[in-house]
Amino acid sequence: ETLLTQSPATLSLSPGERATLSCRATQSVGSNNFAWFQQKPGQSPRLLIYGASSRATGVPDRFSGSGSGTDFTLTISKVEPEDFAVYYCQQYGVSPYNFGQGTKLEIK
Amino acid sequence: QVQLVESGGGVVQPGGSLRLSCAASGFTFSSLGMHWVRQALGQRPEWVAFIQYDATKKYYADSVKGRFTISRDNSKNMVYLQMNNLRGDDTAVYYCVKPHVTLHMDVWGRGTTVTVSS
């Protein structure tokens, strides 16, 4: 079973700053079957990135994903007010399709 | 557009049963597998179950194996989750999730809430 650990747990930034969120897997994630989701209070998770680095339809280009193997990163180049939310990583290569514990991006 | 609408949630006593339903539209349902994912309040999402497009293969999280059963009716564009012997830690919002052909979970329903409490 592949477990995912996200860091930091909370990231406090001001609008316009750069956000870097990390996720580490206990085993290599094959074929880069790795995704990032954004979740706002009361809403379902929203797919941002799949295949480790491909943006989902409609996702602004300030969001980018990188990494391979066991280490992955989500970067928001300049945080906008609507980006403050919780972000989850997930591997979907092998069952169980685990999620990380989340990083909360909050306003500084 | 793709739409997933869950129903069937509610309050149930420990040991009880519930059947969740998910109505799918806007895509070729019979060609894709489907997931159920749940999320307890303030917790990360937890994958629960997956059913292959033709129902020949089903996978479950260890936490629900032997208690939950996923099924589908391709003639009705419906996927179901039968939940038996429910426990307090099954309390969560349950989401129906469509995977893309390249496997990532690209569309989520709005969820239905299950509360297990006496």
Image: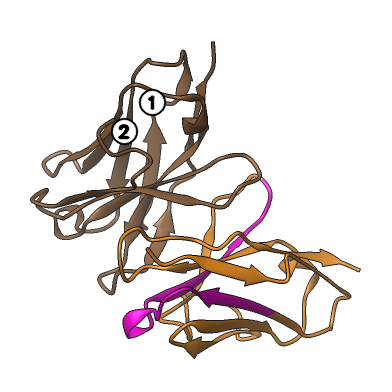
The C terminus of chain A: image quadrant? bottom right
Compared across the picture, whether B46 is left or right of B104 comes to right
How far across and how far down the image is residue A101, in percent?
60, 59
Q: Which residue is rendered at x = 38% and y = 25% of the image?
A: B8
Q: Which residues are magenta?
A: A21-41
* Figure check: A23 above or below B76: below
Cα distance in 3D space between marks 1 and 2? 6 Å
Report if the CB atoms under discs 1 and 2 are less than 8 Å apart.
yes
How far across and how far down the image is residue B16, in percent?
37, 15
Label 1 sits on residue? B8
Q: Residues within 10 Å of mark 1 (few under 14, many from 20)?
A: some
Chain B in the picture: what colour? brown
The N terminus of chain A: image quadrant? bottom left
Question: What residue type is disc 1 on?
Answer: Gly
Residue nearest the viewer, comparing B56 with B79: B56
Q: Which residue is rendered at x = 38% and y = 61% of the image?
A: A97
| Disc 1 element | loop
Compared across the picture, whether A34 is left or right of B24 comes to right
Compared across the picture, whether B110 is left or right of A76 comes to left
How far across and how far down the image is residue A40, in percent?
67, 55
Please report, as a chain letter, where disc 1 is located.
Answer: B
Compared across the picture, whether A6 is left or right of B9 comes to right
Q: Which residue is rendered at x = 47% and y = 67% of the image?
A: A90
Chain A in the picture: what colour? orange
Question: What residue type is disc 2 on?
Answer: Ser
Q: Are marks 1 and 2 on the same chain?
A: yes
| Disc 2 element | strand
* Figure check: B56 above or below A81: above
Label 2 sits on residue? B21
How far across and how far down the image is residue B90, in percent?
46, 32
